[in-house]
């Protein structure tokens, strides 16, 4: 038991509190304490005695602390009462506010990761409410020929200096806004997947930017190594130098992948996530892909694996003349699948900045006057 006189300052209760208590008749004080104790189950019993000392009255306060929960695992922490919150000083309030702010930021960060991370491919509704080749085709052609973002500065094929517009109709474009380009003090990384040499201008552009460049071509006899370990170990970190890899992109499940390897032991393929991990790259700033109709399943893999959150610029050729590798179904079903994949890319943060039509007018082996057999599409990721 701790005892003090009210004129001696703080000792369990303040001087002001002691004076107030003196002004309250004892029987009313006892009654209030009993009522408060019975109404607030979280407050322990309050024992207060009176004793005479030096001609005055001293108050003996045994306990006014709330009951503490037992420290068992899973027991929720007690929320401060109104009286306790009133006694918190400004520093404590700032501390609580900071923790609340941090919690809010963490919740927002988790939400962003959820939005751009792994996601199942969402199949879109029919364009006309029912299967229709014409409606599905018109929807997808309209989508891939209308850029979603205008860039005040662009990088055109073969040029490493930004310009307000390309000098001539461009096959592809890179958005050169300052906030979308890699910082000068950081390593720039570029990947190219092509087997027909159509990436020459892309390589020239990213080389001029000083990027670390990796080219992937399973038919390239000059590439180093024949498997993941050797093939992905050369020229790491060399800006402007092109590293050749005799590899290709994979989209299949592991079991199917193993089956394919048994049938073709000389072939090497890895997912984009596997390749980036092997090379030690968290980010690919520029990626060029002409996958010869394998792009639809590869895109789906990137969406579902969450890989696209680490790709800043994507230039890819899409082929419409046939369904593509491991894509099957009626023509209208294939078109709806393609559109669903494109919507998945957009959901991951990619916005179309340029579209260029290729030759021919064959779509799923049908001649269509208002469509082309292929398109080269340029995207920028606005969420990086």
Image (cartoon, grey):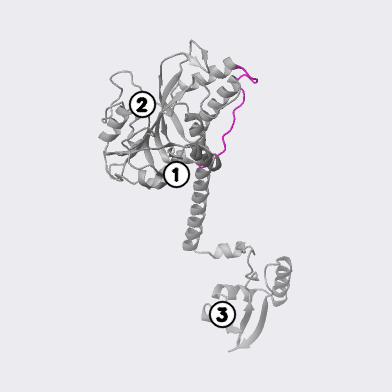
Find disc 2 in the rendering and name its residue: 196
Q: With respect to residue 335, does 368 lie above or below? A: above
Determine whether label 2 and label 3 are within 8 Å by CB.
no
Q: Earlier in the sequence, mark 1 or mark 3?
A: 3
Residue 48, by quadrant, is bottom right
Q: Quadrant of the C terminus?
A: top left
Q: Position of residue 165 (x, y in %)?
A: 31, 23
Q: Label 2: few (<14), some or many (≥20) within 10 Å?
A: few
Q: Quadrant of the N terminus?
A: bottom right
Report the magenta residues as a range.
116-132
Of residues 201 and 75, the one drawn nearer to the viewer in this rendering = 201
Magenta stretch: dominant SS?
A: loop
Find disc 1 in the rendering and name its residue: 274
Residue 357, by quadrant, is top left
Give yes or no for residue 125 being in the magenta stretch.
yes
Work out which residue is located at the far top of the displayed protein and give it. Answer: 369
Q: Residue at x 51, y 17 (%)?
A: 363
Q: From the viewer's perspective, is the residue at label 2 or at label 1 nearer?
A: 2
Residue 377, by quadrant, is top left
SS of the residue under disc 1: helix
Apparent side of residue 9 relative to residue 244 in the rendered image (left or right)? right
Residue 115 visible in image = no
Of residues 102 and 370, the one drawn nearer to the viewer in this rendering = 370
**Residue 262 shows which numbered tag?**
none
Q: With respect to residue 97, does 13 lie above or below? A: below
* Structural distance between the alpha carbons of marks 2 and 1: 24 Å
Work out which residue is located at the far bottom of the displayed protein and give it. Answer: 54
The number of numbered badges drawn on the structure is 3
Q: Residue at x 67, y 75 (%)?
A: 46
Give yes or no for residue 49 being in the magenta stretch.
no
Q: Label 3: few (<14), some or many (≥20) within 10 Å?
A: many
């Amino acid at each position: 038991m701790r005892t003090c006189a009210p004129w001696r300052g703080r000792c369990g209760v303040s001087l002001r509190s002691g004076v107030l208590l003196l002004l309250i008749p004892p029987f009313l004080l006892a009654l209030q304490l009993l009522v408060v104790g019975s109404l607030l189950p979280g407050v322990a019993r309050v024992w207060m005695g009176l004793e005479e000392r030096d001609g005055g009255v001293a108050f003996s306060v045994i306990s006014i602390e709330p009951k503490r929960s037992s420290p068992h695992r899973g027991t929720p922490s007690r929320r401060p009462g109104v009286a306790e919150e009133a006694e918190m000083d400004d520093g404590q309030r700032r501390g609580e506010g900071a923790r609340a702010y941090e919690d809010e930021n963490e919740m927002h960060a988790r939400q962003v990761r959820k939005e751009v991370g792994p996601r199942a491919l969402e199949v879109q509704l029919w364009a006309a409410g029912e299967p229709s080749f014409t409606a599905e085709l018109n929807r997808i052609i309209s989508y891939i020929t209308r850029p979603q973002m205008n860039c005040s500065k662009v990088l055109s094929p073969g040029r490493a200096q930004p310009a307000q517009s390309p000098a001539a109709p461009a096959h592809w474009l890179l958005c050169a806004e300052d906030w979308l380009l890699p910082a000068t003090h950081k390593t720039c990384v570029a990947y190219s997947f092509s087997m027909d040499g159509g990436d020459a201008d892309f390589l020239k552009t990213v080389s001029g930017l000083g990027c670390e460049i990796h080219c992937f071509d399973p038919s390239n006899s000059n590439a180093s190594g024949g498997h993941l370990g050797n093939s992905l170990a050369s020229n790491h970190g060399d800006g402007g130098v092109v590293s050749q890899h005799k590899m290709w992109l994979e989209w299949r499940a592991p079991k199917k992948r193993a089956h394919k390897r048994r049938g073709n032991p000389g072939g090497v393929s890895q997912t984009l996530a596997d390749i980036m991990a092997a090379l030690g790259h968290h980010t690919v700033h520029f990626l060029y892909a002409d996958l010869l109709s394998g792009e639809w399943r590869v895109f789906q893999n990137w969406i579902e694996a969450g890989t696209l959150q680490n790709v800043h610029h994507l230039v890819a050729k899409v082929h419409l003349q046939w369904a593509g590798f491991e894509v099957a179904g009626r023509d209208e079903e294939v078109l709806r699948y393609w559109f669903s994949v494109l919507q998945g890319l957009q959901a991951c943060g990619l916005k179309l900045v340029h579209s260029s039509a290729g030759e021919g007018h064959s779509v799923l082996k049908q001649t269509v006057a208002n469509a082309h057999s292929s398109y080269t599409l340029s995207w920028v990721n606005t969420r990086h």
